[in-house]
Image (cartoon, grey):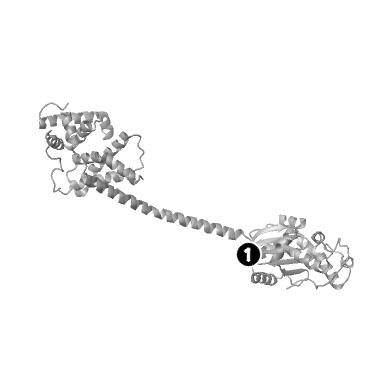
Amino acid sequence: MNNRIKDAFDSIHAEEALKQRAREFLSERIQRTNRRRSPVRVKLTAACACLVLLLAGGYSFFAPVSAISVDVNPSVEFGINLFDRVVSVVGYNEDGMALIDSLDLKYQDYPSALEKLMASDRVSYYLENDGLVSITVLGPTEEKSEKMLADLFVRGYGSTSNVVCHSGVRDDVEAAHNAGFSFGKYRAFLELHALDSTVTEEEARGMTMRQIRDRMDACSSGLSRGKNAGEGPGRHGISGSASCCRQETLPCP
Amino acid sequence: MRDEQEACRAIERYADTVKRLCIIHLKSGPDTEDIFQNVFLKYVLSSAVFESEEHEKAWVIRVTINECKDLLKSFFRSRTVPLEGLPDLPVQDPSGGREVLEAVLSLPQRYRDVIYLHYYEGYSAVEIGKLLSKNVNSIYTLLHRARTLLRKNLGGDEFE
């Protein structure tokens, strides 16, 4: 009789139509769930886009687009980002490296960083002792360079005889760095070299901006370099004579 | 979540089991279809990992019984009367299957599950106890009473 129960239930089967409807129902539900999951994919794409934007933003923050070279005897170059913040500071001589080591200039807006640099003991010493400070700006465009230069004048740089401001030349930057100069000092070297072709890069690297200026003045006025080299921190260790003098002093905008 | 292929495999394998359990508990065809779809939907959505086919089958049986009980307890169901009488039972067969089936279905609800699980699926009282979350002694009692009733309804003393 136990088999009778088994046989009785054995005769019950799910109809094919019932199974088919269940299959269709499940298929539809699975597809709908998968479709509903697609927003996750959208969210993932959005997250990726945000990440890309974040990386691009990070890159644009850390990538320097402008630069300022400050040369006295310390030779320092600021890399400035799109938002006028200092993102890199490089010293191009021992004095420059010692100077940047003593100051925290990174991520400040460049006018503040420049002010801090100019107020430092090392630069102040040169300024008080007839040193010459050369500030050279280089923007991504000529307009930006001019704007930066104008901003420096507004802030009082260039109003005294021992602080001069220039606009740099983009094409010279690589050559300057290869030669171990900041682009500001390299600009001065090129001007001097145009007046006195005997001046070597190595010699110029060892000169202060005052010495370079004096030698240019000497070339321009036809006097010997030895005569012009004088007292003060910027006026020592110059020897030799001016061999050619073709240009006036560095232009000050 | 399981994919469509797994869903189809489960339907092929357990459709008859689910249908039989639905017949034991429910009387209306549309209800059977609802349960049928709900059970397999739960299977698809479940993240349960089955150790064996027996484990999987026990899961399907447990879920089907629960689904049937939930439906019977539902607000709508408790306040309506189904139009149909008995579910679609197989037509009369020479071995008297329909008669036995009607006798089983005429048993009180609590006896039907144990009869089906014991006599058809071959589960022991201990296994049925685990499956239905009931005491083993209660299962023995239910089986005994169900057999007595079946004997009375169908005659003979074959139900041992």
- In x, y percent, where is residue A177? 72, 59
Residue B133, compared with residue B32, is above or below; it is above
B127 vs A105, left or right, is left
Residue A187, compared with residue B33, is above or below; it is below
* Residue at image point 86% right, 73% down: A221
Check disc 1 and report the residue beneath it.
Answer: A84
* Residue at image point 20% right, 46% down: B31
Chain for disc number 1: A
Q: Residues within 10 Å of mark 1 (few under 14, many from 20)?
A: some
**Quarter placement of the C terminus of chain A:** bottom right
* Residue A189: quarter of image: bottom right
Q: What residue type is labelled 1?
A: Asp
A163 vs A218, left or right, is left
- In x, y percent, where is residue A39? 40, 55
Identify the element where label 1 is drawn.
loop
**Quarter placement of the N terminus of chain A:** top left
B105 vs A118, left or right, is left
